[in-house]
Every structure is written in structure tokens, then in C-alpha cells.
Image (cartoon, grey):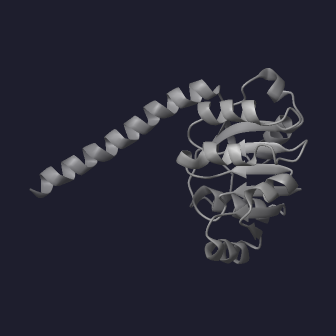
Amino acid sequence: MKIGIIGGTRGLGKTLASILSKEEFDVTITGRDTVTGNQVSEDLNVEYSNDNKKVASSSDIIIISVPISTTSKVIKEIAKSVKPGSLVVDVTSVKVEPSNLMKTLLDDDVEFIPTHPVFGPRTTNLEGQVVVLTPISQKQKEGKWYPKILKFLNDRKVRIIEASPEEHDDMMAVVQVLTHFSYISTASAIKKTWN
């Protein structure tokens, strides 16, 4: 099975490329920096391309792993190039906007699953990790791809959370505010201690 990871040269995309290539999937990564792309390709034993549309047109699964600020642009760029019968997955930490864009722009014969892997680039395997799946309808859950993704994740002992895109974004707003509050409080305490 061919998996294309758009934004697979750094961060979470690179982590997913490493994990999936070890699972013996045929992985192609994309990235803007050709030097970095070729180096990561060699290091991970995956293919590299700087052509997102070409990778989208030849992959069975396309994973969009780019910064939140460019996710919408990438969805718009590849939407009409995606191979019929394939699956598009985004892995950003916000879900409403990508979900709506994929629903609007992708052809009816292309499935999509908005996801949020709640782990970082230092992760080396999936066991025990948390992945949030945010299907937008029951029909989406009954498609060809959703059961396969659930089985793949369950077989690797991933902790799966299902939520609507709206529920996810509401949860993440609280979690991210608490995380930043914790960092700010710690920094403030350290500053007061040293003064």
C-alpha cells in the first residue's frame, strides 16, 4: 500500500514516515526543501518528492502533516489530484476547518478522516499513544477506510478517542490553555525565585 506524507521531512510527518516505513508500507514524503527531503529519504529508506499533487495522485493514503497555518492551503492544492478510492488524513491539532474543507473540496469517491495524533516527534512506536479520530458522520465511519484505520490502530494498542471536530477543538482549547498556563506559572515562579 502506498502512503504519501505531505510534510514528511520534519516533525510529526517525519515520525509517521519512520513508523510506517518500519511497518513495510511504501512511503513517499514531500517537503519544500529538496536537500532535507533527500536526506530524510535516505535516512528512513523512503521516497522523496517535492510535488504534492503527484504524490496525492499516486497514493492510497495521503497524510497531511504540515503546520496548521498551511493545512488549508495544502488541502486546496491537492484536492482535485487525489486518486479515486483513496483516503486523506490530516494530523493537525485543530479539526473543524480541515474537516469542512475536505468535505467540500474532495471528490465523493475519496474518503477522509480528520485525526489528531496526541504525541510528538520523538515517538518511536504507536503502542500506548493516543490518537483522536474525528469522523463527521456515521456514513464516514461505515466507509471502506475507517474500519481499516481502527483495526490498524487497535492492533498496535493505540488509545483511540472518537469525537466530533467541534468537540475535539473545544477540548484542545482547554488543554492548550492549561498547558500554556502551567508553563507561564512555572516561568514566573522561577523568575521570582532567582530575584
Quadrant where the C terminus lies?
bottom left
**In the rendered view, would you say 33 is above or below 101?**
below
Instruction: Tell me which residue sits at (65%, 25%) in the image.
Output: 164
**In the rendered view, would you say 51 is above or below 38?**
above
Residue 54 horizontal side relative to residue 72, left or right = right
**In the rendered view, would you say 60 is above or below 141?**
below
Residue 11 horizontal side relative to residue 43, left or right = left
Quadrant where the N terminus lies?
bottom right
Q: Nearer the viewer, residue 152 or 110?
A: 110
Q: Nearer the viewer, residue 37 or 136?
A: 37
**Is residue 129 among what the camera can see?**
no
Where does residue 128 sit, x and y in percent of width and height? 65, 48
Where does residue 118 sit, x and y in percent of width and height? 58, 45
Which residue sits furthest left? 195
**Is residue 11 among what the camera can see?**
yes
Q: Nearer the viewer, residue 112 or 117?
A: 112
Where does residue 138 sit, x and y in percent of width and height? 79, 22
Residue 163 horizontal side relative to residue 170, left or right = right
Where does residue 137 sit, x and y in percent of width and height? 76, 23
Residue 108 horizontal side relative to residue 158, left or right = right
In the rendered picture of this protein, how many numbered marks are placed on residues?
A: 0
Instruction: Tell me which residue sits at (67%, 30%) in the image.
Output: 100
**In the rendered view, would you say 118 is above or below 136?**
below
